[in-house]
Image (cartoon, rainbow, N blue to C red):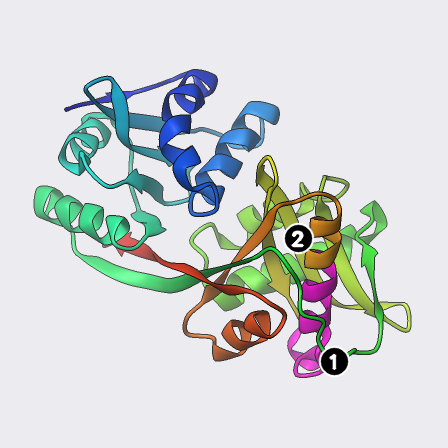
């Protein structure tokens, strides 16, 4: 097996697409990141791409857009992938991906580098192709507008602090703001004209939408707003022609894991964010 760095994102995507296309839902994050790099060249300050080939077929790959963690995919060839990443002068703060591959790669990195590791977040992906209507909460869904940017920035920063995501408040704030006016974009749940919950969405590959972030300010929680918003947003996206919607939850948050199942989402797989320390 041979691990190599690839500098051209289009070339990389074309090479790894057969591997990722075997499970578009599981690979919705890397597919979405690659699409963003191609369509919005200035979105990330830098990006790094590696793959491993065996007999002419890609068996593993990784990408990183600092300050985000290294994202790994595949089921074989991790020793060659690790060697390719370590051969570059790139700081790797941690690794993220689905279990078990993320844990297998992280353990190999620990042994090779001598770094310690800790699981920063354990997550579960849920997906659905239909919606179960929840008990109606007051309010309605509306699109987030450019005039909402101040509130959007405040909520994005609060979400980043609360979840402890590695990119931090400023980076997440910019990423969320970039979704305004996009397709699918961002939506609020509003009551009496005032936003009380937020949800975003991205088409990671044709017909597959990944929902997130989903955020409700603490003072508006336990009123069914997020449940109604996710149900309405999912229904909207499926109605636009999406074949399936997916989202991630923090396994430490029992509320989010229950409300999404209540509107039709079912567990798809577990993932983790692992820090190297």
- Is residue 222 in the magenta section? yes
Question: Which percent across, then down, holds residue 124?
Answer: 42, 63
Report which quarter residue 112 is drawn in: top left
Q: Report the Cα–Cα distance between label 2 and label 1.
A: 22 Å
Taking the image as drawn, is residue 143 in sight? yes
Vertical position of residue 258 compared to residue 199: above or below: below
Which residue sits at x=16%, y=30%? 80
Question: Which percent across, then down, holds residue 74?
Answer: 28, 39
State which tag comes first along the sequence, 2 or 1: 1
Front residue of 43 and 252: 252
Which residue sits at x=60%, y=55%? 129
Q: Magenta segment, which residues?
A: 217-233
Check the picture and name the quadrant holding the N terminus.
Answer: top left
Question: Dot 1 corresponds to which residue?
Answer: 135
Q: For the stretch drawn in magenta, what is the main secondary structure?
A: helix
For the view shown, which residue lies furthest in the right direction?
Answer: 192
- Contact flag, marks 2 and 1 (Cβ < 8 Å): no
Number of residue marks: 2
Q: Nearer the viewer, mark 2 or mark 1?
A: 1
Question: Dot 2 corresponds to which residue?
Answer: 200
Check the picture and name the quadrant holding the C terminus.
Answer: bottom left
Report which quarter residue 153 is drawn in: bottom right
């Amino acid at each position: 097996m041979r691990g190599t760095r690839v500098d051209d994102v289009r070339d990389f995507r074309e090479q790894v697409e057969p591997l990722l296309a075997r499970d578009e839902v599981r690979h919705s994050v890397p597919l979405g990141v690659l699409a963003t790099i191609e369509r919005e060249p200035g979105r990330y300050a830098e990006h790094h791409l590696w793959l491993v080939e065996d007999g002419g077929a890609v068996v593993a790959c990784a990408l990183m857009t600092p300050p985000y963690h290294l994202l790994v995919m595949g089921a074989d060839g991790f020793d060659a992938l690790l060697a390719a990443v370590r051969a570059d002068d790139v700081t790797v703060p941690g690794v993220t991906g689905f279990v078990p591959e993320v844990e297998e790669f992280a353990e190999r990195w620990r042994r090779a580098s001598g770094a310690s590791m800790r699981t920063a977040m354990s997550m579960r992906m849920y997906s659905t192709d239909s919606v179960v209507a929840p008990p109606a909460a007051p309010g309605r869904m509306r699109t987030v507008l450019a005039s909402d940017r101040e509130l959007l920035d405040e909520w994005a920063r609060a979400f980043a602090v609360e979840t402890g995501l590695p990119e931090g408040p400023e980076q997440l704030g910019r990423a969320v703001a970039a979704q305004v006016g996009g397709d699918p974009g961002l939506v609020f749940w509003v009551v009496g004209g005032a936003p009380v919950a937020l949800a975003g969405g991205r088409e990671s590959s044709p017909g597959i939408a990944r929902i997130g972030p989903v955020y409700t300010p603490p003072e508006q929680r336990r009123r069914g707003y997020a449940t109604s918003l996710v149900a309405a947003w999912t229904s909207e996206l499926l109605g636009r022609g999406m074949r399936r919607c997916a989202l991630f939850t923090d396994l430490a948050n029992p509320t989010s894991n229950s409300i999404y199942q209540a509107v039709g989402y079912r567990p798809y797989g577990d993932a983790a964010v692992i820090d190297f320390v």
